[in-house]
Image (tube, grey):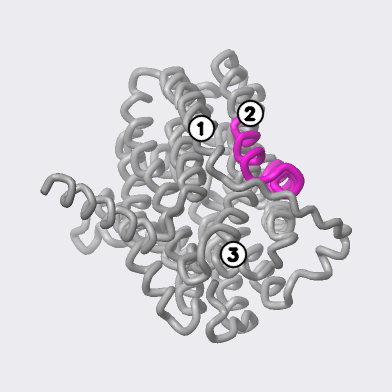
């Protein structure tokens, strides 16, 4: 009887893993996503507050955050392309292992630095882990997961990505009351733990040695027309999103005068909301005729976040809803914008041939980051000239233009889901 129960349990675990698109290769991706993600989220959400405390002012902190975000996007652009090249030439195993190296250097700088510019340099190294690993993770899903399981596999990966975004702000917000240095020490330790686990799991990935020499210009020309239009829509949308992304916490604490712990709770609310939607929406997209409606809703919710952040805390208190409750609504709606993200990733992953998938995805993501890298610095200048509210409203309008472009220009064929 015990042996029979054990067999039933093993069978249930295998069938559940198959239903979720999880195999040994995916486990390595999930460990990287969760471990490195938590390491980043513990400190990154509070970087603007650390700069505010270091420099002594909200506007000065906004300036440094604008500069930081510009270089984040610039380095991400190179990181995606380099990550694609590493995954293509050395395989996904090496690419995901390499992604931890900039974090080690970045944390070393942050732990020793007290000047704003050195803090920015250290933070830039740390944030570059994801672009280095994205092409490899997409290649793993595209090569190792069955076509009818890719949406749900990306949903599971998104859960792993969001769990750190739930736990990180909560942990970071509490630890921040002791000192930012403790956030960094915790995050630094997580990098080493994750790297050790990752090193063992990466042995389970199959090596990829099918090198195909295709010139860079040809790869640019070979991007499918629909993906070109999707890329254009994403660039416009992300311009608006970067007007608010790294400034939202600074606005909540520095302008709306909420506490650091409350800011951590709001960030966790966003991630928890997204977390709840991934599995049911992932299966729904797998069964849907087209992922287009789901991606379109995601675009609309991206565009509405800066508008909601300004308008709801201002007008809902007049209806008897406290400011904090209004902010919770704002950040719940912001979490719902992840509804179509797994579908979008699956669409992009399957849009390129297997032989060049890693390089092509790195190129796609890199071009996107290069295109909107000036947006945060422009946001800072607008913040200084016309104030944060007007800046965020402009960002929302830009996002709505990107959403309109998607709905009118991007034609996803029926059945072209994964």
- The residues colored magenta run 73-100
Residue 101: assigned label = 2
Give percent across and percent down for residue 175. 35, 24
Residue 313, can we see it? no
Secondary structure mainly formed by the magenta segment: helix
Q: Is residue 117 above or below residue 79?
A: above
- Taking the view exactly as shown, the residue that stands out farthest to the left is 1
- For marks 3 and 2 on the same chain, the one whose residue lies earlier in the sequence: 2
Mark closer to the observer (1, 2): 1
Residue 200: assigned label = 1
Residue under the point 59% across and 18% down: 108
Q: Please tell me whether mark 1 sits on a helix, a strand or a loop.
A: helix
Pointer 1 with pointer 2, Cβ within 8 A: no
Does the stretch in magenta take in 242? no
Residue 237: assigned label = 3
Residue under the point 64% across and 30% down: 102
The quarter in which the C terminus is drawn is: bottom right
């Amino acid at each position: 009887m015990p042996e029979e129960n054990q067999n039933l349990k093993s069978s249930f675990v295998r069938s559940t893993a198959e239903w979720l698109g999880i195999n040994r290769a995916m486990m390595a991706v999930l460990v990287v996503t969760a471990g490195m993600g938590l390491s980043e989220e513990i400190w990154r959400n509070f970087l603007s507050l650390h700069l505010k405390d270091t420099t002594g002012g909200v506007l000065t902190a906004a300036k440094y955050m604008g500069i930081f975000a510009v270089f984040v996007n610039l380095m991400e652009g190179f990181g995606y392309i380099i990550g694609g090249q590493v995954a293509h030439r050395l395989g996904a195993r090496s690419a995901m292992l390499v992604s931890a190296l900039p974090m080690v250097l970045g944390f070393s700088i942050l732990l020793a630095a007290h000047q704003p510019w050195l803090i920015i340099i250290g933070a830039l190294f740390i944030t570059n882990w994801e672009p280095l690993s994205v092409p490899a993770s997409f290649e793993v899903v595209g090569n190792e997961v069955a076509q009818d399981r890719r949406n749900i596999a990306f949903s599971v990966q998104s859960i792993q990505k969001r769990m750190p975004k739930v736990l990180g702000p909560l942990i970071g917000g509490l630890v921040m009351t002791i000192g930012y240095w403790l956030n960094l020490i915790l995050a630094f330790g997580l990098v080493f733990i994750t790297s050790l686990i990752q090193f063992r799991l990466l042995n389970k990935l199959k090596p990829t040695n099918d090198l195909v020499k295709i010139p860079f210009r040809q790869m640019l020309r070979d991007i499918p027309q629909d993906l070109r239009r999707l890329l254009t829509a994403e660039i416009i949308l992300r311009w608006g999103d970067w007007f608010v992304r790294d400034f939202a916490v600074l606005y909540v604490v520095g302008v709306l005068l909420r506490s650091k712990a409350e800011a951590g709770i709001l960030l966790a609310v966003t991630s928890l909301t997204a977390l709840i939607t991934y599995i049911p929406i992932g299966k729904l997209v797998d069964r849907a005729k087209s992922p287009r409606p789901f991606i379109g809703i995601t675009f609309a919710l991206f565009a509405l976040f800066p508008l909601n952040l300004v308008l709801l805390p201002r007008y809902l208190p007049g209806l008897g809803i406290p400011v904090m409750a209004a902010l919770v609504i704002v950040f719940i709606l912001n979490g719902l914008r992840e509804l179509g993200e797994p579908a979008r990733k699956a669409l992009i992953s399957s849009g390129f041939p297997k032989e060049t998938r890693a390089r092509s995805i790195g190129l796609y993501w890199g071009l996107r980051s290069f295109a909107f890298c000036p947006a945060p610095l422009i946001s800072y200048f607008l913040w200084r000239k016309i104030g944060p509210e007007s800046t965020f409203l402009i960002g929302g309008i830009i996002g709505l233009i990107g959403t309109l472009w998607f709905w009118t220009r991007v034609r996803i064929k029926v059945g072209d889901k994964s």
